[in-house]
Amino acid sequence: MTDDYSWLEEPQPAASEPARKRRGLRRFLPRLRRRRLAAQPADQPGAAALLEGQSERPLTELDQRLQALRARSLEGEVHDERQALYDVDQALTSPALQEKPGGVISAVALSQAQQAQVDLLTEIVGGQSDPAEGTAKRGLAGRAVQSLPNIPRLLISALLLLFVALPFVSSDYAPGALPPADFAEDDPQAAAFYAALDSLSPGDYALVAVEYGLGAAAELDALTDLALRHIFARGGRAVLATSNPIAYLHARNLITAIRDRAAQAGLRLVNGLDYLLLDYLPGGSLGIRELNENFADIARRSIRAAPISLPLRELTDMKLLLVVADSADDVRNWVEQALPDAGPRRLYAATSLAAEPLARAYVEGIDRFDGLLVGMRAAYTYGAMLDAAFGITPQSSAPNALASPETAPAGSVGSGASSVLAAAPSPTPLPTATPRPTYTPTPLPTNTPVPTPAPTIAMIRIVEVTSPQSPVNIRVGPSTAQAALGLAYTGDTLEVLDTNADSSWYKILMSNGWEGWISAIVVTERLVPDTAPASDESASNARERAVMSRFYPRRYGKIEPRFSQVNQVPVSARGAIIQLRERGGEAQRLQAMTMGTLAAVLAIALGNLAAAIGALARRG
Amino acid sequence: MNRRPRAGISMAAVTGFLVGSVAVLSLLLGDNPALFGDGAGAEALAQNLALPGDALLRLLMIVLALSIVFGIANLLTLHIRRLASGRLMSGVLLSSFAGVIGWHIMLPGEPSLLEAIQLPIESALAALLCVTLVAGGARILTRRSDIWGLLFTLVVVLVLLGSLPLPELAPIATFSDWLMRIPAQAGARAILLGIALGSIVVGVRALLGQDRSARG
């Protein structure tokens, strides 16, 4: 059987119809071309013959309409699709479009000939025509109008909106209990998730894969935010990765928001040390495989120019892997591509409710896939557990948050953010009124507490990029006339080698070992202890080195960055990172979900009850 | 029947078969040094055998990344043509594209466009899906008034009721939990098995030239 169907697809030009230039509004109308089936070459089989001779699948698997078509072709022993599909070529040939004099698109109506062809096609494919849907109707004034709105759908929409809005208006319409403050008993996988993150020690790395689009952000942002804060609060370091380009941007915004909010409370989260956002991994599962195979280079590339970086060489440097996903496919990709080579490391996941069934099948069937959190209710419990663990006073519910927004201080993010800050014991001075965090990087104080260096530890000079106009250039020489060598971003830290005569430029060490110059205007200089040993590990593993030496000999040579430590968030201040999270309307949202579910049950039950009664009535 | 072989298709099929075979063999053998015995020699041999597979996968990564660039270029070209032919909505797309690029250049790191515009829009669309699903759920028996439609409706209602945090519905929650953990889990595992078997079948068919999804 041949697979060349091009003669069926190629339209013949309508030679008798010269192209006419449209004028006015008519040129916005869709240009319908006359399409004719090409003449069937003598040596090619017809569509009916193809059906007749098909042997790929049993006939019983064919759609009934195709079976009928095949039987029809066998009866007449025809081998021409135009005979098998009676009049189909005429049906596919569109007559001239009928337009209203005004020429606007909404005034286009099907002509009688077109309607006849629609009916013919409908009959050929065995479909049912529904004149109430999809056709234009003419009003009394002769103006075409769209079909009337679907009344039941409008009622359902109104019911859902009403029920969902009620909890925000009054606490009298808030049925059901809020999730418990501990899921240790009823959900062991959720408890395992919490225990894993809680067991992180200072300096441990956790890979956080952010694999959800913006449509799921409302459901999963809270889980991502809590997990990141949990990691930071335990002194861990988060390495964020994603194979979703939108999720990459969103993850960057999430971590930036956490960093900026922490900075307002005097806590420093340093890019390249406390957290690192790996470059976007193109290719879905292939990108994750590449991360697994080539972790060191992806991490180094993501750090960009900062030499003070995370000493990451392999995926096994992570203490745990955490995937936040809105799709079971993403969970599957990480399970299949990252987990096998992650050594003894274990995987944990937080998913949307829609992805739960397939994700749970994995978590219950794979040894090193241990924990699962699902949806907003789990996020609420997670937050409550973190509050309890870090001694934060639970926020009182504010049922009228929407009704009286003035109760929140101007500029605060959450309705109760300032009250939490004021009420909870704080190891660091916190602002009494939290200004709205902006995404413009806040200039950090130069006198930020730096851990007291041990006498045996040498100090090194570093500069941190503080310019809000990020990225800034690293140049070949101490002048803007010199060629740019690389880029540095706000928050990047670079080791200082020297300065020029008037100290207006710093000579710095880049992550790839190159030396460059950066203007003093865009950086702030500090002294930090040089504690971490230099690494001579050039690649993730032996195979990686072999591949790199063959394919990337110049780019990934012998030069390695020096890994140094700068200040970490002090242990005493870590609880503030949990404290600073946004909590506005958590309870109301959960109650709105409950009310919305009630409305959905009502709509489905009543709608189907009416349908069942109608069906019984019709059957007498 | 006069069948004329096409050189391009034949070449593509042969290339696909060779590349696929090399990649599969390389990755299979490279990940299993035990096949070559014990010792450093076996490990080194396995690593060397893995090189072609790794290189091909990296090549694919580069091509995939490059295809995004081509895709953007193609999209822009198409909409410039459409704009030239008078389709104004293409102008909206092009101006939005330029605006986002300009925004990023002028205000690097400023997340307002994504967080203040795209996120609410996508969230709203996701919320609209809820209305559509409920509206569809309310018409199940209208479209299919048989025992299966009734069963489907009952399961939907019970699972929804079971998810409510109401103590009065505890028995339903127990049943709903059973539904999710046993039948739904069984279905989920069957789907996963089907995906795995389907992947193998599709891979073999592609290697044998039965499937040429990319006309390769």
Image (cartoon, coloured by chain):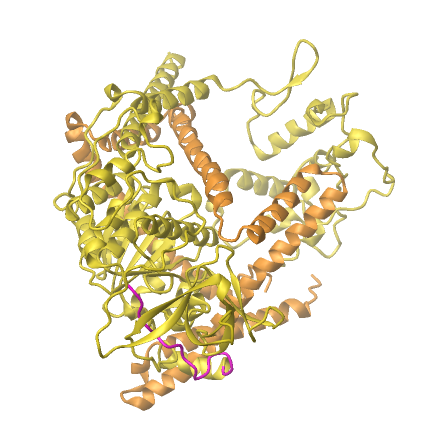
Chain colours: A yellow, B orange
Establish if B61 lies above or below B179. Answer: below
> Viewer-proximal residue, A133 or B87?
B87
Outermost residue on the top side: it is A140
Outermost residue on the front side: it is A502
Establish if A599 lies above or below A140. Answer: below
Establish if A71 lies above or below B25. Answer: above
- Residue A119, x across and y down, in percent: 64, 27
- Is residue A41 among the parts visible in the rendering? yes
- Residue A495, x across and y down, in percent: 40, 73
Quarter of the C terminus of chain A within the rendering = top left
At 30% across and 70% down in the image, what residue appears?
Answer: A565
- Residue A177, x across and y down, in percent: 19, 30
> Viewer-proximal residue, B34 or A45?
B34
Quarter of the N terminus of chain A within the rendering = bottom right
Residue A581 horizontal side relative to residue A497, left or right: left
> Viewer-proximal residue, A596 or B20?
A596
> Viewer-proximal residue, B143 or A324?
A324
Q: Quadrant of residue A277?
A: bottom left
- Is residue A341 among the parts visible in the rendering? no
At 24% across and 33% down in the image, what residue appears?
Answer: B163
Is residue A563 covered in magenta? yes
Residue A182 horizontal side relative to residue A559, left or right: left
The residue stretch that appears in magenta? A553-567
Is residue B71 covered in magenta? no
